[in-house]
Image (cartoon, grey):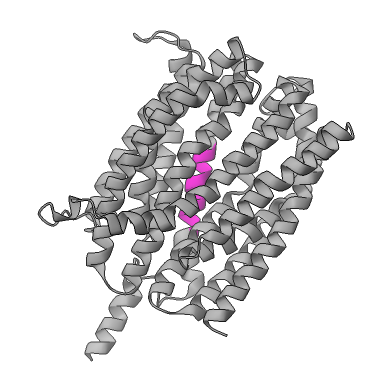
């Protein structure tokens, strides 16, 4: 009777992802995560729309800021991802004390990361934007946006870290609530901060940054309360607050590879913008807008990747490898069902989609050219994100770094240099190169992940 009672408790415990049917668990984690990312994307879309209304240079500056901003989110997401894997494994092994200690240590580690990011960003942003081709008033516009973001990056970092505590227990709804509320409020705050009024001076593009800082601070406070309510954020009479170098090392061992994997995305944007910007600000603006459309379409990928990470972490801790294999197959299947049908409408309506963001015909032409190729690249991202997230949950984050460096940096740089500088081709060669790189990487990611799982459980 006692065993039956424990089984029933686990079956009804929504934080336990090791016993309930895999499709049910995927829905629990993936749907709120995807919805939350939709709100996050809408937040960015509103920023892009208002920046484009200031002038094309402001839209280009916001687009150029994307890879720089990604330095912050990559580091925060990496530490959060690594900590999710550690906390999830502890929870899967039924050791809440260890999970609680990791959670508190992660927050202390995050403070150090935030301070380092602020110093780095404020010191090196001018050089980074200069390398990307910004100078004069264009550079000033870029810095007016990024300086407040770097100075107040603690709010961004806190969101990722408190969410890691919640996500390790299968809670992706709290972040969804934050992203939904901030996206809605951003609709009102962006124009107010840009144009001024009610006691505020007009701030231009800097207003977009300060709106982001304010809303992220509010979101971080909400997530902090939710995380404390889980019972994992326990100081144990202050003992858990004492830095434990061993745990810091464990977090770094899991988090830095995940951060570097995310950082390769930022490096990839640097490489792309380095080559795109040689075709003028219109091309930079076009690619920046098109990536916002990408973010909307790829919403299921984010949710499925989050589900893959969380499910594999808990089940790896519980030594239930067959459930990890099943989750991988189901996530890839759901991704195909959701992404493949979108390819044709994106191809057919590429220009109308771009017109939603800008009236500039040059920007529309380049953006539509990108979307027509990207339409048939989309499912490739599922085949990359889900397997690498599965490996991260199994405490094997290193593969994602090498894959990321290859597909985001080395291969694009070599192909872009060949096609644009030596052969003199235009932007179309960039998009076709991305298509080939993504699908090659997808094949490698699926093969390696299945091979790793089969070694653990033939």
Answer whether residue 65 is visible to the viewer in this image: yes
Residue 347 sits in quarter:
top right
Q: Main secondary structure of the magenta part?
A: helix
Residue at point 34%, 62% (across, down) = 87
| 393 sits left or right of 242 in the view | right
Confirm whether the magenta stretch covers residue 35.
yes
- The magenta span reads 30-41
Confirm whether the magenta stretch covers residue 156.
no
Answer whether residue 341 is visible to the viewer in this image: no
Name the spot of residue 29 as percent of width and height, x first: 45, 60
| 317 sits left or right of 194 in the view | left
Up the image or down, 254 lies above or below 204; here it is below
Farthest-out residue, bottom: 1
Residue at point 63%, 56% (across, down) = 403
Name the spot of residue 284 as percent of width and height, x first: 69, 26
Up the image or down, 372 lies above or below 316; here it is above
| 351 sits left or right of 116 in the view | right
Up the image or down, 215 lies above or below 377; here it is above
Residue at point 51%, 74% (across, down) = 324
Name the spot of residue 53 as percent of width and height, x first: 60, 17
Name the spot of residue 320 as percent of width and height, x first: 44, 79
């Amino acid at each position: 009777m006692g065993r039956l009672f424990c089984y029933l408790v686990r079956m009804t415990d929504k934080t336990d992802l090791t016993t309930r049917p895999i499709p049910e668990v995927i829905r629990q984690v993936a749907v709120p995560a995807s919805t939350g990312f939709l709100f996050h994307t809408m937040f960015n879309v509103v920023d892009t729309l208002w920046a484009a209304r200031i002038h094309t240079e402001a839209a280009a500056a916001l687009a150029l800021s994307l890879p720089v901003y990604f330095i912050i989110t990559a580091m925060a997401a990496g530490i959060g991802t690594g900590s999710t894997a550690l906390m999830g494994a502890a929870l899967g092994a039924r050791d809440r004390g260890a999970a609680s200690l990791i959670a508190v240590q992660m927050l202390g580690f995050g403070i150090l990361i935030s301070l380092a990011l602020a110093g780095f960003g404020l010191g090196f942003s001018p050089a980074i934007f200069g390398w990307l081709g910004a100078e004069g008033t264009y550079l000033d516009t870029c810095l007016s946006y990024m300086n407040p973001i770097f100075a107040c990056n603690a709010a961004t970092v806190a969101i990722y870290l408190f969410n890691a505590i919640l996500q390790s227990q299968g809670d992706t709804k709290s972040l969804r609530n934050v992203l939904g509320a901030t996206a809605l409020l951003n609709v009102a705050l962006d124009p107010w901060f840009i144009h001024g009024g009610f006691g505020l001076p007009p701030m231009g593009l800097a207003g977009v940054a300060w709106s982001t800082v304010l809303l992220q601070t509010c979101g971080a406070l909400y997530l902090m309360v939710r995380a404390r309510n889980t019972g994992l954020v326990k100081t144990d009479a202050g003992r858990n607050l004492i830095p434990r170098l061993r745990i810091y090392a464990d977090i770094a061992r899991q988090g830095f590879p995940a951060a570097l994997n995310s950082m390769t995305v930022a490096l990839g944007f640097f490489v792309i913008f380095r080559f795109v910007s040689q075709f003028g600000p219109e091309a930079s603006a076009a690619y920046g807008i098109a990536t916002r459309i990408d973010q909307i379409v790829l919403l299921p990928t984010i949710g499925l990747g989050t589900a893959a990470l969380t499910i594999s972490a808990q089940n790896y801790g519980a030594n239930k490898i067959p459930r990890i294999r099943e989750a991988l197959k189901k996530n890839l299947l759901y991704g195909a069902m959701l992404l493949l049908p979108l390819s044709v409408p994106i191809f057919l309506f590429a220009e109308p989609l771009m017109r939603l963001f800008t009236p500039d015909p040059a920007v529309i032409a380049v953006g539509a050219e990108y979307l027509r190729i990207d339409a048939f690249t989309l499912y490739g991202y599922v085949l990359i994100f889900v397997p690498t997230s599965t490996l991260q949950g199994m405490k094997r984050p290193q593969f994602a770094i090498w894959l990321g460096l290859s597909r985001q940096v080395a291969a694009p740089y070599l192909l872009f240099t060949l096609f644009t500088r030596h052969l003199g081709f235009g932007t179309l060669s960039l998009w076709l190169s991305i298509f080939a790189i993504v699908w090659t990487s997808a094949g490698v990611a699926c093969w390696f992940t299945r091979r790793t799982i089969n070694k653990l459980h033939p």
